[in-house]
Image (cartoon, rainbow, N blue to C red):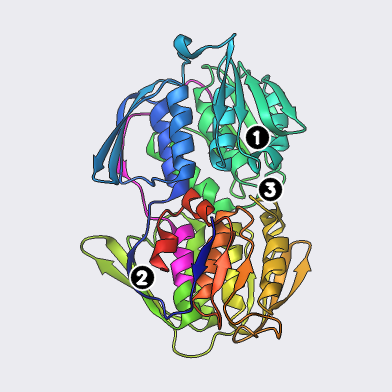
Amino acid sequence: MNVRISPRRFTGAIKIPASKSHTIRQLLIASLADGESEIKYPLDSLDTQSCLSACKTFGAEIEEQRDGDKIISWKIKGNGGFNYVSSITVVNSFAIDVGNSGTTLYLALAVAALQSQSIEFTGDEQIQKRSAAPLLDALAGLGVQTHSNNGCAPIKIKGPWKGGKVSLPCPTSQYLSALLIAAPLAPAGTITEIEVPMLNERPYIEMTLSYLKEHGIPFEASQDFSRFVISGGSSWKAFSRAVPADFSSAAFPAAAAAISRGQVTLLGLDPADTQGDKFFFEMLEKMGCAVQWQKDGEYGHSVTVSREGKLCGGTFDLNETPDLLPAAAVTAAFAEGDTALVNVAHARLKETDRIAVMAQELAKLGVSCTEKPDGLVVHGKGFLPVPENMPHNGITIEGHGDHRIVMAFAAAATGSPVPIEITTAESAAVTYPGFLELLA
């Protein structure tokens, strides 16, 4: 579907939805645990529903608690390691459709490798173009049978996990998180040693390790995260906890406030959380926004973002936070001077090549960009220069079926001189249902 957004000053108080990264990790861990867990106030989005479906297929029993159309909690009865249920076997194998969720695909691939049952993974058109080759090579080195379409879905996995020493380059941290979640459940006496010659998105590994620590699972990790050793024979424990709010999602209403000279208060974000995308608020401050954190009795914390003066360009390293590139790029389009988003080649490996797509679509708004192999330089003028051929009734931007591209240009529309129509807008529901409605 298409959505048309007209310019307006974006203001208000907004409860930020729960973190997708935390929600999916909690779903998988609860399903792997013995006993009943409760995940409170999870993210209810297309990606998390894909993970929920995968966990059910693996045999977890999940009960949903709702208040009207809002999910209050998931109660999950795990089965101690995704022991597959015979009733869902079809010709000695079964398939799991992860939809558009790369996080679900990578993390569940490793968990499936613990089973002696053949399991096939598939997904939508974008998923079938996203390579899991480094992860599959590492799993093969641990004794797991893998079959794929040149590293892409459909992918078949068949254990058992025999352990050993493997090298795992990580253009996405999800490859390493997958092994860290699954390796403790290998048979007792199994040692998994992981050499990591390259790692992007380090904060997401810190997030995964925080769960291992919380559940008392032992591991060895070098200070620079270049080596991990995990023994099998451990188990995940049942738990009850709420899901933190999502800094990745919060970037878009914050960007809209910065772009439109509005003021938003974002509720529920914890500045002490491991999510790396909280860096966006540091970026906004350096670019000229006022960013004020407060303790909030109902939501724990809140942050208010506003702008009165001009936005200024700068240089920002997004290696740890590649998902920020679309929101950062549209904000930079309204800044004076060049904004360099650097060290983020892995942004090309997401749902789309986000570096190329942002340069292509910003050009339609009259914004000049320079693509780099590992980043994007946005040549801002402090406003969107209206191209001579831009119709006054608006312009159409291609969303490319990428939720972060769609939401970034929705934020840009608030400060545009003309309305912006965005295609494939339904993809915003992958991580932030309701965001487009916020922008009317």
- The Cα atoms of the two marked residues, 1 and 2, are separated by 38 Å
Q: Quadrant of residue 340?
A: bottom right
For marks 3 and 1, give the CA distance.
Answer: 15 Å
Q: How many marks?
A: 3
What's the amino acid at mark 3?
Pro
244 within the magenta span:
yes
Q: CA distance from mark 3 to mark 2?
A: 31 Å
Give how far across and how far down residue 325 sits, in percent.
61, 64
Q: Is residue 277 above or below residue 71?
A: below
Q: For mark 1, what is the residue?
A: 194
Element on which disc 3 rests: loop
Which residue, given by chain and number where applicable, does mark 3 sit on?
Answer: 171
**Does the magenta-highlighted stretch encompass residue 429?**
no
Q: Please state the extent of the stretch shown in magenta in the rendering.
A: 231-255
**Badge 2 element:** strand
Mark 3 and mark 2 lie on one chain; the one further toward the N terminus is 3
Q: Name the residue located 73 percent from the left edge and 30 percent from the top edge.
A: 137
The residue indicated by pointer 2 is 303
| Rendered position, 210 above or below 389 | above
Crowd class of label 3 (few under 14; some 14 to 19; many from 20; radius 10 Å): some
Instruction: Please state the horizontal and vertical placement of residue 116, each as a whole percent of the image.
Output: 58, 13
The answer to whether residue 187 is seen in the rendering is yes
What amino acid is labelled 2 in the image? Val
Q: Are marks 3 and 2 in contact (CB under 8 Å)?
A: no
